[in-house]
Amino acid sequence: MTGCLPGRVPLNWYRNNVTVSLELLDVFIRNVESQIELSIQEFKIKKETLSLDEEPEFNYSRIIDIHLGLDSETFDLENIFTEYFPSIQRRSAFLSLYGFLEHELDNLCALFKKTENLKVDLRESNHWGIERSIKYLEIVAGLTIDTGNDKWGKVKSINKIRNLLIHNDGKLDDIDGNPKKKERNILKQNKYLSGDYEIIFSKGYLSFVLKTFNDFFKYLDELIQNRCEPT
């Protein structure tokens, strides 16, 4: 089978393409978390506490904290600098990780098309995003993918979180104020996610996402390797 020849082919996709990217993204995640920790420590060390409108005779003064131009009378500084801002940083990194998932799945489809001279192009599919790639690998490339397994289920849950960010700015209610029940349920099932009105990403979620993607990629690689074994 042409798809089992050595070189830049589906058979070597995981080993030659994915594993290198995974190593780099692991370093990327650790760097993001390191930057977040430094920012939190900077807030705790450098925030200023001021006494205003002191009136000793009445034993009264206004005590406020200030950091980077924000004050504790207007904002919950502890929440903003130890939870909200770190979540925003992780949110941005998460979207980069998701882009890696989409890219590698599209890349695998392209390898199958080129190596096996498939006539159907990925762009001809009626599906979108990762569903498009999976349908292509199933229908056109002939991989028997079990979309009912836990590995794909976790990827789909991550996909819902991604869509929540892109299409609803991470808010957990729709435009009419109705709760997005599926997304809220995902939060309940993942210890790294939380939030009442907006999704909050905690330390550990980025690594969880990368591991989930790797598990699914390894599953696809197993299917490819088995497909190429001589009968």
Image (cartoon, rainbow, N blue to C red):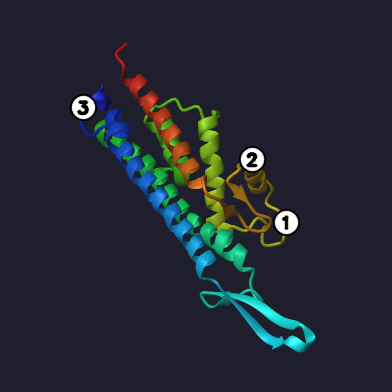
Residue 48 image point, x, y percent = 56, 75
Per the image, the residue denoted by label 1 is: 178
Marks 1 and 3, how far apart at CA: 53 Å
Quarter of the view holding residue 8: top left
Q: Is the Cβ of the residue at disc 1 closer than 8 Å to that at disc 3?
A: no
10 Å neighbourhood of mark 3: few (<14), some, or many (≥20)? few
10 Å neighbourhood of mark 2: few (<14), some, or many (≥20)? few
Per the image, the residue denoted by label 2 is: 189
Quarter of the view holding residue 189: top right
Per the image, the residue denoted by label 3 is: 6
Residue 84 image point, x, y percent = 57, 61
- Residue sitting at 67 percent across and 51 percent down? 180
Q: Nearer the viewer, mark 2 or mark 1?
A: 2
Q: Is the Cβ of the residue at disc 2 closer than 8 Å to that at disc 3?
A: no
Is residue 74 depicted above or below 14 in this figure? Answer: below
Instruction: State the SS at label 1.
Output: loop
Precedes in sequence: disc 1 or disc 3:
3
Q: Amino acid at mark 3?
A: Pro
Residue 4 image point, x, y percent = 26, 24
- Residue sitting at 52 percent across and 46 percent down? 205
In front of the other: 150 or 194 = 194
Q: Quadrant of the N terminus?
A: top left
Is residue 202 depicted above or below 3 in this figure? Answer: below
Precedes in sequence: disc 2 or disc 1:
1
